[in-house]
Image (spheres, helix red, strand yellow):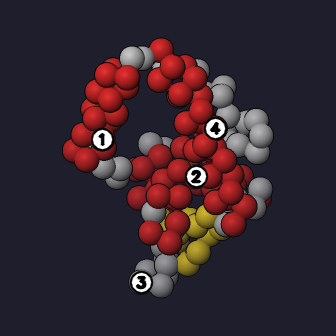
Amino acid sequence: MLAGAAGHHGTAGADVVAVLLPLAEADEQRLRMNELADRSHLTPSGLTRRIDRLVAEGLVQRVSCPADRRGAHAQLTPSGREVARRSIEYLGAVLDRHVAARLSPQETAALSDLLARLSREHPPG
């Protein structure tokens, strides 16, 4: 359902969202490459290929790490922030249409509570 959901109305596909969303949630919308690989569930080489493509598309930029000259951060560009924002909105609408619309108000509240608990107990990274 979600894999094919994005890619419309200026949103990103699931492969891109896996990288953009962790960056959108990070301080200064920037993460070290190894941390981003962990949060996006990609191998370092898989992330490198994905970042190369996102840099070419103007959605992400590589930024030197001041504390470690060998290290680098990936950071959202203004265009990347906009695509991430639209993707979040679109995926929320898809979830509403395919999940929330089929639940009672009590089931929706229970699901919301469960997801909040999971988020607290298992934060990204």
Q: CA distance from mark 3 to mark 4?
A: 37 Å
Circle 3 sits in a helix, a strand or a loop, which is it?
loop
Residue sitting at x 59%, y 75%? 63
**SS for tag 1?**
helix
Point out residue 47 in the picture as x, y percentages from the top left corner: 55, 50
Amino acid bearing label 2: Leu
Q: Disc number at residue 20?
A: 2
Q: Which mark is residue 90?
A: 4
For the residues labelled 3 and 1, the Cα–Cα distance comes to 34 Å
As measured in the structure, the alpha-carbon distance from the residue carrying label 3 to the one carrying label 2 is 24 Å
Residues at circles 3 and 1 in contact by the CB criterion of under 8 Å = no
Question: What amino acid is found at the position of numbered circle 4 in the picture?
Answer: Tyr
Q: Nearer the viewer, residue 23 or 62?
A: 23
Tell me how far mark 1 sits from mark 2, CA to CA. Answer: 21 Å
**Residue 121 versus residue 82 in the image, above or below:** above
Tell which of 98 and 81 is nearer to you. Answer: 98
Give the Cα separation between the discs numbered 4 and 1: 20 Å
Which tag is nearer the camera, tag 3 or tag 2? 2
Q: Nearer the viewer, residue 101 or 125?
A: 101
Residue drawn at x 41%, y 58% is 35
